Amino acid sequence: MRRLDLSFLAMTLVTIIVAFLILFPLTMLIYGSFWTDRPGFPGNFTLDNYITAYGDPDTYKVFLNTALLIGAKTICAGVIALALAWIIARTDTPCRGMLETLIIIPFFVPGIMEAIGWIMLLSPKTGTLNVYLRELFGLEKSPFNIYSLWGIVWVMSLGSVSFLFIFFVTALRNMDAALEEAAAASGAGPLRTAVTITMPMIAPIILGASFFSFIRAMDAFEVPVLLGLPAKVFVFGNRIYAAIEYDFPVNYGLATALGASFFVLMLGLLRVQHKLLKGKEFFVITGKGYKPQVVHLGRFKYVTFAFCIGFFFLATGLPLSQVVAGSFLRVFGMTQWDMVTLENYHTIVTDPLVWRSLTNTVMIGGAAAILTVLLCSFVAYITTRTKYAGRNALDLICWLPNAIPGIVAGVGMLWAYILLPVPLFGTLTLLLIVFITIGLPVGVRLMSGVMGQLSPELEECSMVHGASWAQTFRKIMLPLLKPALAAGILILFVNFSRAVSTTILFSAHGTELLAVTLFKYSQVGTRLGLVSALAVVLTVINVTAMIIARRLGAFGRESD
């Protein structure tokens, strides 16, 4: 009885901690949307924040721009990702293994680096490509302007293709080719078979992944801020940020009203997703053996090869080359040999602000990743391996941050922790709490999936021999989970190292983070060399950690 009580108390404690981390900021976000003043200041309850927000015609422009952005981005990225997945999984295009690696690379590259690269390429005044085209054709005006709604769509679409590709290519590889073979035997060509048989068979996966990408687009922050604010193109994310950073006086009322509205809208969209996908399942993996059908393209296979290379060039090669080249230049755009320098990288080590940002990112990001994975392991164990009465509620609470965009979560946490009697604001401890909170959804899903693969017999055998719940978890479960734990720590560290939307509101002297410092320097635009060097360092950290995580099986084993 004592052992059972201790287990119950431990699981209840974990539930209380998770509920506090997630529900407290969410409650304070809603509370703040009805408050007349900024966080920590006396005021009264009011509806004026909502009346002001929805009485302003610009709010409806924000809705329209957001709808156009996420709709166009989801469609463009989905079509490209589907074409690439079909080429890699179902055709005889040469060098498919190499091409798959190249297509996935943008998934590991921080969005802020892609935005910086395209700014260097397509800035109206100094963009490399615009300058070249003006000189080549004698143009007075630059043909491209990255600071626009369609510039945001372009950058975000290219950045989302790899995310969707991972889902689509896996589905196509796992699909039984019997129906495709029957269509081919009936005289259907490769294109007709793909459109009428292959794509409908994986329709639930296409719909689910595209809808998830749609939701992720609503959470976008860095690209809309860097490309949208200079042209006064507002979507939800950058408008909430502008209300806090640029409006005078600071408009916390508008930020919280839009944030609370955004949260309700996200919940509604996720509910729609659930209804659309409910019951829509096709069994693409059957009991009998099969081998995915390979479509022989003849000479056309070189066209598909060029298409894949072209995507990599546009999505990664072109913007990345600008950033890497810029990191070695004293003045961006001046490509003479006497302008080549290592000074920008030297500044990372010698500049107190930059070095402090780097060390804070490594220490706080690493510590938060370890603590988050440990907490998520307990949560996953409770929700998947026990009959604890509150396990379903715990699982739902851990899922909630998926419906809260980063900047909205940041506003909620700002309200929550500034009102606590403990002085947390402006401390590294608060950043640690913020990281753990935003890492819970990913960590719990990862650890739940891994624990679902372990047989309950292992624990039952341990307990039959007298081991306690804690001993079983420590001596049986944790050793088996070591690769997943390591992969989870790396994935979460990557997420934390490039988190901007949530952490930017908590950045103060002594608590700077590398991604936030990079973001703020990018907005100033006067130190492009240092910005480029910081972006390269951040990308190297991200890519290295993700490659190790993939080796550990975080994204499935690499194909031969």
Image (cartoon, helix red, strand yellow):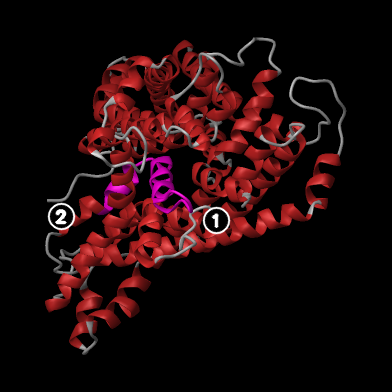
Which amino acid type corresponds to the residue marked 2 in the rendered image? Gly
Position of 282 relative to 428 (above/below) = below
Q: Position of residue 238 (x, y in %)?
A: 60, 43
Q: CA distance from mark 1 to mark 2?
A: 36 Å
Q: Position of residue 166 (x, y in %)?
A: 31, 53
Q: Which residues are magenta?
A: 103-127
Residue that label 2 marks: 97
Q: Secondary structure at mark 2?
A: helix
Q: Residues within 10 Å of mark 2 (few under 14, many from 20)?
A: some
Apparent side of residue 93 relative to residue 471 in the rendered image (left or right) = left
Q: For the point 73% across and 52% down, which residue is it?
A: 59
Disc ID at residue 135: none
Which amino acid type corresponds to the residue marked 1 in the rendered image? Ser
Tally of numbered discs: 2
Q: Position of residue 237 (x, y in %)?
A: 60, 44
Q: For the point 37% across and 28% down, which residue is it?
A: 493
Disc ID at residue 148: 1
Tell me which label, 1 or 2, sits earlier in the chain.
2
Q: Quadrant of residue 3?
A: top left
Q: Secondary structure at mark 1?
A: loop
For discs 1 and 2, the disc positioned in front in the rendered view = 1
Q: Position of residue 428 (x, y in %)?
A: 51, 15
